């Protein structure tokens, strides 16, 4: 399956070492002003080579649109686009042609399809997420008119965790440092940990927190199209993601119902809640409060040290990875999380408009 979404829908294509990665977007509302500088800014937040703690690969990641935009606005027609690949070092992967990298898609992919592109993982590479960032940027532009804001940030790297709740921080400040954490002191500790791990030829994982504000009441359905379920599916479809939780999540199990319930109150003419343990979603439907969730990313599977594995013939071999890889995926994954959230929220907004005559 290469298509995501119902009414607002992306079909992506391309491989990491192919000509390029792109997509076709259906369901983009007509008349939306397309801010090309904003789209490029979103791509720049994801691109490699942007700081000392990510892969040093150099990719300009310039998007080229083929259709669906006229005189600076969306037309309602399908939007086709491509980002051409650059600076590929395919020879770095020659030793992987017959070798299965641990915790990658190599073995499972060839078992399913009978072949695989060993150069950077081909279709299973995180390079594919660049199509999601373009689509997410367009979704964000559409959501601007609704005043819906989506901001993600790095809240944990390894055992270095941002203290307290997101409400204690100016989360827009996350863009002021290379690890994308809204607290400068914690950011320094995170960067030091990533540098230490990289110097050892190893990698480290962490958590990204995302906050969606000003979501109208009523997005999502009470059974199979629950808003949080679709957000979870979107996040779990990102490379290296191992977990998703919203609201109080797993921490909520230690409390009583009397402590967890979000008590309703009235603020002027608006119904609101005194707390937001539900994470802005109740019964699968948005309630107007902040939607917040956390996404767990595993350590990058490619490590620059000897590791035992097997090859296509079933022989035990020692693998020493080559190339330019991220010691921690978190800084570059922040815009991907935001993009997938924007796609889901816009899709549910459009679906909600079909519920009433």
Image (cartoon, helix red, strand yellow):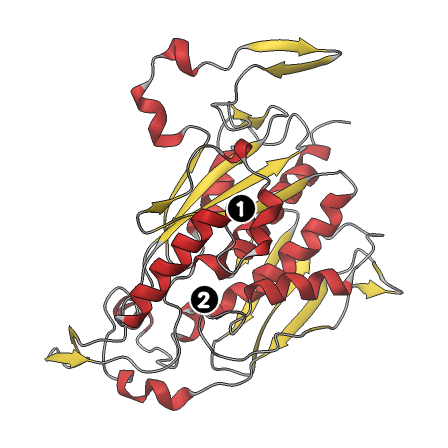
The structure residue drawn at horizontal position 33% and vertical position 17%, both measured from the top left corner, is 255
Image quadrant in which the C terminus is located: top right
Task: Using the image as rendered, state which of residue 3 and residue 209 is in the foreground.
Answer: 209
Q: Nearer the viewer, mark 2 or mark 1?
A: 1
Residue 5 visible within the image: no
Describe residue 232's horizontal placement relative to residue 318 as left or right.
right
Residue 321 position, x and y percent, is 27, 79
Q: Looking at the rendering, which quadrant does residue 254 occupy?
A: top left
The structure residue drawn at horizontal position 61% and vertical position 49%, both measured from the top left corner, is 343
In the rendered image, the vertical position of residue 109 relative to residue 172, given as above or below: below
In 3D space, how far apart are the residues under numbered discs 2 and 1 (Cα atoms)?
Answer: 25 Å
How crowded pointer 2 is (Cα within 10 Å; few <14, some 14-19, many 20+) is rated as some
Residue 334 position, x and y percent, is 52, 54
Describe residue 203's horizontal placement relative to residue 306 as left or right.
right
Q: Which residue is mark 2?
A: 126
Q: Earlier in the sequence, mark 2 or mark 1?
A: 2
The structure residue drawn at horizontal position 36% and vertical position 24%, both measured from the top left corner, is 252
Q: Which residue is situated farthest in the front direction here?
A: 185
Q: Which residue is mark 1?
A: 182
Residue 215 position, x and y percent, is 66, 33
């Amino acid at each position: 399956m290469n298509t995501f979404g119902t009414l607002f829908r992306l079909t992506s294509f391309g491989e990491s070492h192919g000509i390029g990665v792109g997509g076709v977007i259906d369901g983009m509302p007509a008349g939306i002003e397309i801010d090309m500088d904003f789209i490029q800014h979103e791509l720049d937040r994801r691109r490699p080579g942007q700081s000392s703690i990510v892969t040093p690969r150099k990719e300009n990641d310039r998007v080229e649109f083929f259709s669906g935009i006229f005189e600076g606005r969306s037309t309602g027609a399908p939007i086709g686009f491509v980002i051409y690949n650059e600076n590929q070092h395919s020879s770095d992967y020659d030793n992987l042609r017959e070798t299965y990298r641990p915790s990658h898609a190599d073995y499972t992919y060839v078992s399913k399809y009978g072949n695989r592109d060993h150069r950077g993982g081909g279709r299973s590479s995180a390079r594919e997420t660049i199509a999601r960032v373009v689509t997410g940027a367009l979704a964000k532009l559409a959501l601007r008119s609704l005043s819906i804001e989506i901001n993600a940030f790095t809240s944990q790297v390894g055992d270095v965790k941002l203290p307290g709740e997101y409400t204690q921080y100016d989360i827009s400040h996350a863009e002021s440092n290379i690890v994308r954490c809204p607290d400068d002191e914690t950011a320094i500790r995170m960067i030091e940990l990533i540098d230490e791990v990289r110097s050892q030829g190893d990698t480290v994982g962490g958590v990204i927190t995302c906050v969606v504000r000003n979501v109208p009441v009523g997005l999502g359905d009470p059974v199979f199209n629950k808003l949080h379920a679709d957000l979870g599916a979107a996040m779990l479809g990102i490379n290296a993601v191992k977990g998703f939780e919203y609201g109080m999540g797993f921490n909520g199990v230690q409390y009583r119902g009397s402590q967890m319930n979000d008590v309703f109150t009235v603020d002027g003419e608006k119904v609101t809640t005194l707390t937001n343990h539900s994470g802005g979603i109740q019964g699968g439907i948005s309630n107007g409060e902040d939607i917040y969730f956390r996404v767990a990313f595993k350590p990058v599977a490619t490590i620059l040290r000897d590791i035992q594995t097997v090859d296509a013939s079933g022989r035990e071999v020692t693998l020493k990875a080559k190339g330019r890889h991220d010691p921690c995926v978190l800084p570059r994954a922040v815009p991907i999380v935001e993009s997938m959230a924007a796609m889901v929220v816009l899709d549910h907004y459009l679906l909600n408009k079909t519920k009433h005559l």
